[in-house]
Structures are given as C-alpha cells and as structure tokens.
Image: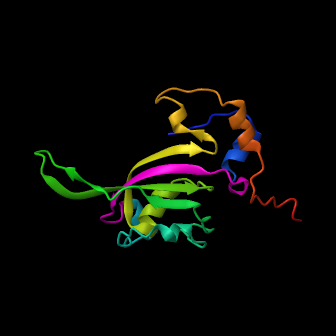
Amino acid sequence: GVLIFTRAGIMARRLIEPNTGIQKEYIVKVQRAIRPTPQEREMGIRNLPAPTKDLSVLLRKGNRLLNERFALKPLKEAEWLDDGQNERGAEGQQQEVQTLTMRLVLVEGKKRQIRRMCRELLGWHVVELVRTSVGPVRVDSVPEGKWRPLTQEEVKAIFEEQPNEKNPKRNR
C-alpha cells in the first residue's frame, strides 16, 4: 500500500492531522469474526456483533471503540466492492469461509482503527488491508516494491486548503 516517508514535520502533520481533510483510501478484505480474541477478552469484549453488510454505521458520528476516550470521525465513504467469494479447501471443496471486499475512505487514522471498527462495529475480521491512496498519491502510480519522490503537483495538492476545512486557530 501507499507509504509516504518525509523528514518535513509540516508535511507529516498535514498528512496525519484529521482537521486537514486529507483522505486515505483502503481496500479491506474481511471474513466473519467467529469469537473475540484473547486480547479483546482482556479489554472487556465478551461478544462481537453479528456480521452486518450495513456500512452506514461507519458514516455516522458518535462511533466509539471500546476503551477509547473520544468518538471516531465518520468515514467519508464506505462501500462493498463484491458479493464475496468462498474459499476452497485442500481438495478444492468449498468451505463456509466467505471473503468480502470493501472500500473505506477516512480522514482520521488511529492505530488499528480499521481492524477494530470492522470487528467491534461490524462483526467482521480483517484478513487483508491495503492503503490505496493518501490524498493525491495513489498506489497504482508506483510498481510494487518500488518507490519514487512525490511530484510537485502531489506536494501542492497536499498543501492546498480543503474546501470544508475548519482551522480551529482561525475560528477563535
């Protein structure tokens, strides 16, 4: 997926601060979550929700992950990309494990946020997670395992003011 390395603190803050509105897009493959992990049980999760295909919950304000002090910012977009595929066993027999793919776009990216949202809010276990873009930088513009410097256009787009951006310092 897309990784941006920089020694410029101002660019790093611009990319990670949720108030800047820089969108991050992810392709997420999920399977039904069976039971809470030992770590989740330690955190106090006794049951996971039944898997749901209703992604509108991620677009609403007020979602809170267990043991998190603040609510999550709503996602910008959330959609299913397919109807799922069944995994095949060793002898080619169909098993009951269904893998579904979703596309999520967010402006906030807390540690393990997508994995936890999928489990705690939707009842799905993430089996693959790829960040396909950060702002104007897309994964398809770089071959796998390779790197390149950002173009002037990409840097300019990262620093352009977002249309709905609210700068708390200006509103005082």
> Measuring 72% from the left and 41% from the top, which residue is drawn there?
157
Residue 93 image point, x, y percent: 12, 51
Would you say 150 lies left or right of 139 here? right
Q: Position of residue 12 (x, y in %)?
A: 70, 42
Q: Nearer the viewer, residue 48 or 58?
A: 58
Q: Which residue is rendered at x = 59% and y = 65% of the image? A: 74
Query: Residue 39: x, y in percent?
Result: 41, 60
Residue range of the region highlighted in magenta in the rendering = 18-38
Q: Is residue 24 magenta?
A: yes
* Residue drawn at x 10%, y 45% as measured from the top left: 91
Give how far across and how far down residue 86 sits, in percent: 23, 54
Instruction: Choose top left, top right, bottom left or bottom right for residue 80.
Output: bottom left
Q: Which residue is at a point 50% across and 50% down the rendered structure image?
A: 26
Q: Quadrant of residue 50?
A: bottom left
Q: Using residue 8 as the reference point, say whether residue 60 is left or right of it.
A: left
Q: Quadrant of the C terminus?
A: bottom right
